[in-house]
Every structure is written in C-alpha cells, then in structure tokens.
Amino acid sequence: MKRILLRTANVALLLVFYQGAVSAHHGTAAYDMEKSLTLKGVVTSYEFINPHAEIRVAVTDDNGHTVNWLAETNNPNRLARRGWGRNTLKPGDTITIIGNPVKSGAPDLRLTKVILANGTELDPL
C-alpha cells in the first residue's frame, strides 16, 4: 500500500513540474505586451505547422532597408477554427501585421492581427 501511495505521489509531482514547463513555453514572457507594432510588408513564407504557424514578412523601413520579420501565431488547429488554412497566405502577398515585439529587439513578434491587401482582417488569437 505504501508503495502505491509513493508512486502516485511521484507521478503527481512529475505532472506538476511538467505542466509548469509547458505553460512557460506557451507564455508571453518573451514579448513586450505593453507595445504593439504595425508593419506592412510582403510575405516571404507561411508555414502552417505545429506548434505555432509562422509568417515571414519582408518589411522595408524608411531608409529603404529590408528587414525580415517573423510573426508567430497560434497553432494550426486554433487558426483553422478561425478560418485560416494552408493557403491563407502566399509568398508575394502584401499584408499588414500587428503584434507584440520580442523584448530582445529581434525582428520577431507575437501576431495579434493580419490585414490583407483587400482590407480583410484575420484574427489569429
């Protein structure tokens, strides 16, 4: 009986620690949630993959320099429930991306909205 109780307690502890690691992965700690960026550019790639779909966008700044941004979205399952699919975006599409930048200053953001060239808004959350 003691052995079963001990195993159950060990399994419970492992699940608690594992759950914390999973929550950290899906958190927003890396992003500056107080800031929002709006960037217009051209899609260079769109990966409808797990664990997070990714959109890469070439954005030209005011000085004519192109910066390649990574916009991280939700998982494909959640996106599909919001009307997204594998062919929602294609390389060459001009889009506006809105999201929270990473704190490190890298060209990476947590996507909160996409606006297509025709004005259609896509919600990834």
Image (cartoon, helix red, strand yellow):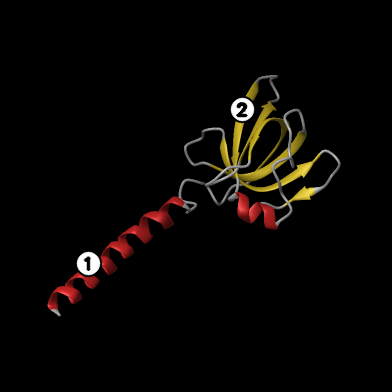
Q: Quadrant of the N terminus?
A: bottom left
**Structural distance between the alpha carbons of marks 1 and 2:** 46 Å
Quarter where residue 92 is shown = top right
Which residue lies at the image location 71% right of the left edge and 24% below the top edge? 62
Residue 125 visible in the snapshot: no
Residue 46 lies, with reference to residue 50, above or below; the image says above
Mark 1 residue type:
Asn
Which residue lies at the image location 14% right of the left edge and 73% below the top edge? 3
Callout in the foreground (1, 2) = 1
Which residue lies at the image location 61% right of the left edge and 32% below the top edge? 69
Residue 99 visible in the snapshot: yes
Q: Which residue is mark 1?
A: 10
Q: Residues within 10 Å of mark 1 (few under 14, many from 20)?
A: few
Mark 1 secondary-structure assignment: helix
Please state which of residues 107 and 11 is positioned toward the viewer in this rendering: 11
Q: Which residue is mark 2?
A: 68
Which residue lies at the image location 43% right of the left edge and 57% below the top edge? 23
What x and y, as percent, mark residue 116? 79, 41
Residue 85 lies, with reference to residue 55, above or below; the image says below
Please state which of residues 33 and 92 is positioned toward the viewer in this rendering: 92
